[in-house]
Amino acid sequence: MEINGIVLSPDPRLRQECAEITEINDDLVALVERMKVQMFENGGCGLAAPQVGELIQLAIVDTEYTGADDYDPFVLINPVIVEASDTLSPYNEGCLSIPGINCEIQRPNRVVVEAYNLDGDCMRYDAAGDLFCVCLQHEIDHLHGKTMFERLSPQQRMHAMKEYQAALARGAKPGETE
């Protein structure tokens, strides 16, 4: 199921390992532009390609924009977490593919991510203790077939899934949280 161009859980595309990108071409650039529009229109701060139905290792992240004038997401092609702290911190996360709820997820409070941009340059992002750190990890999870549900204990997952079903029943759309 899709709403506003966003694939919703439990769509099987969200549970698949995504293919590495081997070429930066016009189709990829067009997909990035489409993802930017969909992320902005749905009020997200991150979006991974499987969330728009494309099973490739591509994500975009912008955790600091306040409107269209300063909206310029980072493009992450084949992103890899090359370093992660042992210290975990809780963060209340939402997801465009799981509208209407938030879940408290424990994640490393610092990560270093390497990814290529649209120019083919390898970029390095060092993030700690903020939304950018969480968003990088959340989007990279999507590229490996993991949603925030998979980060929960079985009991937490059952509770979250019930909340999600109730949210869908009341008409929750991507970008809406509790």
Image (cartoon, grey):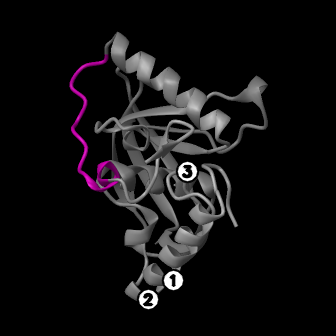
Q: What residue type is labelled 3?
A: Leu
In the image, residue 8 sits, relative to residue 53, either above or below, namely below
Q: Is residue 40 visible?
A: yes
First in residue order: circle 3 vs circle 2: 3
Q: Mark 1 points at which residue?
A: 159
Q: Which amino acid does label 2 sit on?
A: Gln
Label 2 to label 1: alpha-carbon separation:
6 Å
Q: Where is residue 163 in the image (x, y as percent from the top left)?
A: 57, 75
Q: Give the range drawn in magenta.
A: 12-24
Q: What residue type is labelled 1?
A: His
Q: Where is residue 4 in the image (x, y as percent from the top left)?
A: 57, 38
Q: How crowded is mark 3: few (under 14 residues within 10 Å), some or many (20 or more)?
A: many
**Label 1 with label 3: CB-CB less than 8 Å:** no
Q: Name the residue under label 2.
A: 155
Q: Mark 3 points at which residue?
A: 96
**Residue placed at 48% from the left, 50% from the top?**
136
**Label 3 with label 2: CB-CB less than 8 Å:** no
The secondary element bearing badge 3 is classed as loop
Along the line of sight, the residue nearer the viewer: 66 or 162: 162
Q: Position of residue 94 (x, y in %)?
A: 59, 60
